[in-house]
Amino acid sequence: MANRVLLNTSGLKVSEPGFDVLTAGNANLQFSSDWSALTLLLAGGVNVPASTSQTVFFGRTFIRTPIAIVPWNGFGQDSNYYYLTLSEMWAATSIATLYNNRIVFANPYSTPYFAWYYIWNYG
């Protein structure tokens, strides 16, 4: 099993699963205290018509997939907040997919929806 967490006088590092934190490069770290703080890259909202998708481009391509926070109310049913990173599908419904240069909102439903998004860059 790989060493995943390193805490020493130089800071804290956490590697991705399967990578040894002692030898992992930045591309294989999930966190490093050497990185700069999060900065807000893009924020806004998008209307997604029924049975279609909408793409929001970031204006640049990142080496690592940025972080997205997408508040979602489940069509008014609840008030959940989803956190997307590493191209994960949003919950089991595949409402949004995050890439290095864009986020794609899909709408498999017969009702349009509006989604807020906050895209964060990290070192």
Image (cartoon, rainbow, N blue to C red):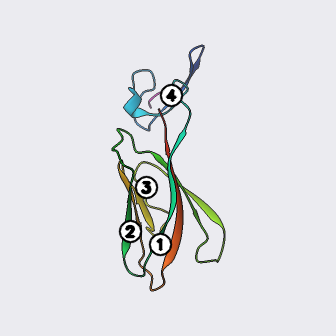
Q: Is residue 19 visible?
A: no
Question: Would you name the residue on which mark 1 appears?
Answer: 47
Q: Is residue 108 visible?
A: yes
**What quarter of the picture does the N terminus occupy?**
top left
Question: Would you name the residue on which mark 2 appears?
Answer: 54
Dot 4 or dot 2: first in sequence order is 4
Type of the residue with mark 4: Trp
Q: Residue at x 64, y 77 (%)?
A: 77
Q: Which mark is residue 35?
A: 4
**Mark 1 Cα-neighbour bin, 10 Å: few <14, some 14–19, many ≥20:** few
Q: Which mark is residue 63?
A: none
**Mark 2 Cα-neighbour bin, 10 Å: few <14, some 14–19, many ≥20:** some
Tag in front: 3 or 4? 4
Q: Is residue 64 left or right of residue 77?
A: left
Type of the residue with mark 2: Gln
Tell me the CA gap for discs 3 and 1.
21 Å
Tell me the CA gap for discs 4 and 2.
31 Å
Q: Element type at marker 3? A: loop
Question: Pointers 1 and 4 in contact (CB under 8 A)?
Answer: no
Please report the bounds of the magenta region as a residue range. 1-5
Q: Element type at marker 4? A: loop
Question: Would you name the residue on which mark 3 appears?
Answer: 88
Most distant residue in the bottom direction: 110
Type of the residue with mark 3: Glu
Q: Quadrant of residue 29?
A: top left
